[in-house]
Image: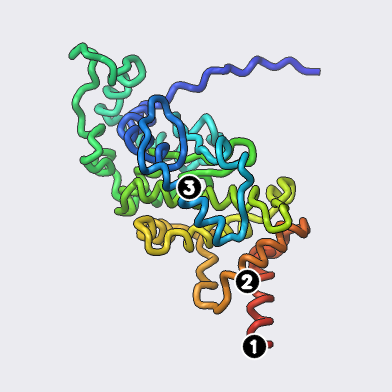
Amino acid sequence: MSIRHPVSVYPAPPSPLSAVLAARFAPLHRELADACGGTPPALPKSSRRKLQKDYVDLLSRHMGLSLPPHEKGRDLAPIFSADLVRRQVDDSECPGWDNLMRELESRSIGEVGRLAEHLRHREMERSHDPRTRLPESPLLNPATPLLPQLRLEPGELLELLGGCEIDLLGTYSVEYGITLYYARIALCAEALGVDPFALGLVVYIHELAHLISHRGLDLDDCNWPTYSFNDASTYTVETIAQWYTSLAVVGREEEDAFYALLRGQSEPYTAFRVWRNEPMIREYVRMAMLEIRRCSLPDNQPRGSLFERVRQLVKFSKDYP
């Protein structure tokens, strides 16, 4: 038996820079939430919201899977993390982002501290008192590049974040569904030179592909058992998500953002590219994915069982045309 101190139910206060980022990218938060089915307070209805249905239908068609009706509501709505790091993803899972915040805060940027003081203690958007209204600052102007103000080169940002690809921009979890980190998305979009809304959609499509591959039903009404999904190799689950994201963005505005992000990623996020010129590859990948979902065998191949099964199917087709 042991005695433990009770865990506080209150989230940790945001760091100064996190507070500034949250305020600066609030419009992006609202746009992504609207497009992807999130429900921030007082969100006006918009035609952007049909994008969620478009991508659910598009991915379902490519994957040959369908979500049951009860999965299309609450479970599809992303959680948009307002505190950027600590509520949905523990710091230990995203050390690169936490280290970046510490690095920038150690540079003692006075403007960040001054703005953060206001953001923590005032509801600026509702204030009509000039003494408490949020001060004008280029840090909060979406039209003003942020990286130079933080004394960062685009390549330096990506280098500092290079150790936290997993769960940096978004995540899918069995318990919480889809989470998007809109401030991280916006900063990386500036570094990559792409539209932040387009990059946010790319992240959403990728996480949505995880969700559909896990919960989607095949023609026999079978999904991917959660214990087997959780035990699958990173290569297998990330390759499935990246492959179907690449198919979903073809010819759409998000395609440039997808390939700009891809240039900075490493395996297993880029491994799917070896398939692009193989005949019948869409059918082979789909067949391999369905087999892995149903067999529940250990996924212990060096690059995941998905790659091995696709390789066998491609070899068979070449040996017996």
**Secondary structure found at label 1:** loop
Secondary structure category for the residue under label 2: helix
The span from disc 2 to disc 3 (Cα, nearest Å) is 26 Å
Image side of residue 262 versus residue 122, left or right: right
Residue bearing the label numbered 2: 284
Q: Position of residue 46 (x, y in %)?
A: 36, 38
- Looking at the picture, does residue 299 appear above or below residue 34? below
Give whichever of discs 2 and 3 has the lower sequence position.
3
Which residue, as the protein is rendered here, is positioned at the far right? Answer: 1
Question: Which quadrant of the rendered structure holds the C terminus?
Answer: bottom right
Task: Kindly tell me whether residue 266 is visible in this rendering.
Answer: yes
Q: Residue at x 38, y 38 (%)?
A: 183
Work out whether mark 2 precedes mark 1 in sequence or the reverse, and give the earlier one. Answer: 2
How much space separates mark 2 and mark 1, taking CA atoms? 15 Å
Residue that badge 3 annotates: 53
Q: Residues within 10 Å of mark 2 (few under 14, many from 20)?
A: many
Residue holding disc 1: 321
Q: Amino acid at mark 1?
A: Pro
